[in-house]
Amino acid sequence: MVWTLLALHLVGIVASIAFGRRSIHLGLRLAAVAPAATAIWAVVGLARRPEPMVYELVWVEALNLVLRFRTDSVALLMAAIVSGIGALVFIYATGYFGPDAEGGARFAGSLLAFSASMLGLVLADSIWTLFIFWELTSVTSFLLVGHNNSRPDVLLAARRALMITGGGGLALLAGLLVLGTAAETTILSELTPVDGIAGTVGAVLILLAVATKSAQVPFHVWLPGAMAAPTPVSAYLHSATMVKAGVLLMALVGGAFVDVEAWKIGGLSLGIVSLLWGGISALRQVDAKLILAWGTVSQLGLLVTLLALGTGKAVFAAMSMLVAHALFKATMFLVVGEVDIRTGTRQISELGNLYRTMPFAAASAVLAGVSMAGAPPLLGFATKEAAIEAALGAPGAEGVIALSAISVGAVLTVAYTVRFLWCTFGPGPDIAVKDRRLAMTIPAAILALTGVAGFVGLGMVNTVVGRAATELNEKSSVYELLRWPGLKTAFVISMSALAIGIGLAAVLIRRPIVAPPAATGANIADRGLDGVLALARTTTGRVQHGSLPVYVATMALVASLASIPFFTDVRFGHLEWWDHPLQMVFAATIALTALAGAFVRSRLGAALTLGAVGIAVSGLFVAQGAPDLALTQLLIETIVVVGFVTGLGHLNREFPRIAHTWRNVRLGVSAASGIAVVVALASASATPSGVAPVEALARESVDVGGGNNVVNVILTDMRALDTMGEVVVLAVVALGIAALASSPNASEEAHIEEAAS
Amino acid sequence: MIATRSPIVRLGIQAASPLALLAGVYLLFAGHNQPGGGFAAGLVFGAVVALRTVTGLPTPLDPNTLLAAGVAVLCLTAVAPLLGGNELLDQQVFSFNVPLLGKVKSGSALPFDIGVTAVVVGMIMALLDGLGAPRLAKATQPTYPLSPTIDTTD
């Protein structure tokens, strides 16, 4: 079934791109099919609770490289959220985008590609499968954030998001390697607790990945920028699903790190700082969408805090909070998108009286807001109660710290929620509102009502979330969400937070709205990235200077230095002057012509002397008894001389004069290479490595290859595969030369650009 | 370029081309038992092509066709033994009687060598193209019959 659904997504991607070109709305509706089918499958699975299935496709068994999915309660719950919200977002997008919006096909295709990646991520059961889909979500998120690719600020935000989440992906790869090795399995559901150094290193690396993906301080800087994306993307990726990937990862591997101190300390610090800083920053924002984005940072911080506590109660609270957050935050974003489209602005100072002009959107927002603030009688209330209970039940100092952070966080959450609702929908300047678009209103209302239904049918939520939490932590099975907890400590804390939060919001609403300070963190991230790019450019400029003589000199010098270890092996005693007197003649010719080549002033002369050197070398081969080698060498020299002469047609006849120093450097490099060759040959002949297998080769050549020319039989028969490889390389080189030669050079390029403009 | 302006060089190369081609063919076939082989034959053909190109004489083939054909022949020779249940690149030797020549022995090494030859020639032609040899030769092409006022200062 999983394969079918993934295939359906792929078909959907192709179809939505193909049809989206003609009509963006058709593309988006086609794209909604696969998520809708997946959501139905997941909900049915959750309700009927069949045995968890494992779907496996083995690639390299020895390396445990498998594509492996599982359908247990956690996977099905996440799949239901991802695909359910996904289907609604696609419908919503048909209202968000006008019928003639730019790049509609690209948008529908990328969004469905993201949906498929996210589905793969939540169903993954092998750490490699998880990693692949994790990276795919980063890439598709980049495409979606950068959807309006003509705006430089959007491109900057997209790049920032990709670099930070991509960097986290590298940490994830390393962390999963450490974890997989330490736990001796790559199957997520079979992970065993790890400890020691491997546990600490793995925990830190995976927390890094979690922090980048789930926008935890200080890696959160990409999330506010990512709000440059179209609102359907923000609602889907940056509130409900992708940013939850880090939290999900934490939940899945949390069991393996129960004994690791770094996991708990690191997770708690990340979570608590994000919870508080996100809440404070949300209070300072004046853009309705950014208030929600910072609120997401804060809520994700709460989830990370709970999972870092790691007790059964905390895991249960985290899972229920995750469900509630996906519902109310997606609703909020959808409503903000509708406000944006219908009024043309998201600045809270310009919005007012929308409760009268946009009553349906306002109702959805209030329902979601009550849930977000954790006020009864909605799902958010029950889950916040569970979170406070979990912190109350946590042992020792960490429990006290977590409890105070969650309480303060609850106050901040109430405050920014109230401020958001009041400033957006409450009394204020009148603003013109366009007609309602049902495609936008209905998905938001459905999500908001699901939050209500969740509280009404709390028993059902309990069962589903409880099962999922129990799979992650066995101790979670005894907990449940309460509709009315009674006058207990948690309830008192929750209600006090509500009261203080409303008071704080009332104070803030009366104060004038001022623009928040510039995002320094984002600027630092961008500057760092620019710095790296500048460094790369400088380094490339230094190393790849484009001077051919310097390249050659560098290569020759490095090759010469490689001969240094062989100096000790040189024995001159056993070297003979010659095997045949003719060799002396050729050697002298080589020396003389080479010397002449170094001194001759004309380029043609140099080419000819080089040819003479080569021909004399082939004479040496003849004298040594290697006619095949000699023949090849001779022919090569001929071709090379013709090539030289052709190339010289482009150049001056004489070499240019060169600076004195540079000439000395060249002399030095030449001398070094000469010495290196002598040393290499002398040391090689001083340490013979066995007897050459001439006899055997000659016999085999005639018997097997059916030829008397041993060299040729080796080339075409015994080592035919090598020859084939070399010939293919030759062909590829030839293609490369053709491509290089046909690409325009700098001056021609300038000419083309001139003609085009 | 000097070569295009000298009718002697031009005619000489034109006259020598068939002989050189013959030499190349000999090297190709003799290669299995005597010095020579596909690579050497390719170099001879390549030299012929190179000399013809720089003197502005026509060359019948283009490098891409040769490269593609060469690699295709090589791959076919490599895969063909698999059909007969033998190993990749396994050498098959045949001997048969040909009128006038008598008993001839040959093998699948021959097509293999032909493939090598084609790729080597293609490579040389691509190199010459890359160096701009055909353009250069065209630019300095003399008009025949040679006029007495031809410019020889360059």
Image: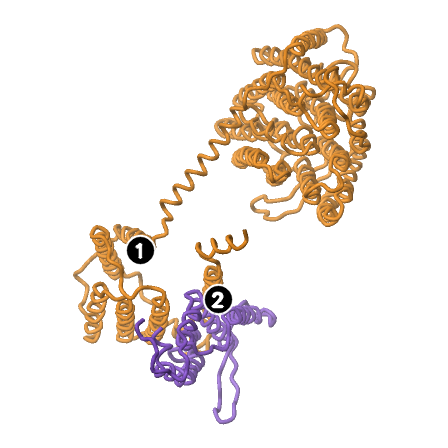
**Front residue of this view, candidates A11 and A1:** A11
* Tag 2 subunit: A
Q: Is residue A344 at least partly visible in the picture?
A: yes
Q: Which chain is orange?
A: A
Q: Identify which residue, A105 or A112, lies in the foreground.
A: A105
Is residue B42 toward the left or the right of residue A661 in the image? right
Q: Residue at x 58, y 18 (%)?
A: A277
Identify residue for label 1. Answer: A549
Mark 2 and mark 1: Cα distance apart in space: 33 Å
Q: Where A328 sits versus A116, above or below? A: above
* Residue at x-position 78% and y-position 24%: A361
Label whose residue precedes the other's in the sequence (2 or 1): 1
Q: Pointer 2: what residue?
A: A724
- Mark 2, Cα crowd under 10 Å, few <14 / some 14-19 / many 20+, is many
> Looking at numbered disc 1 in the image, what kind of residue is underneath it?
Pro
Q: Position of residue A164 (x, y in %)?
A: 54, 33
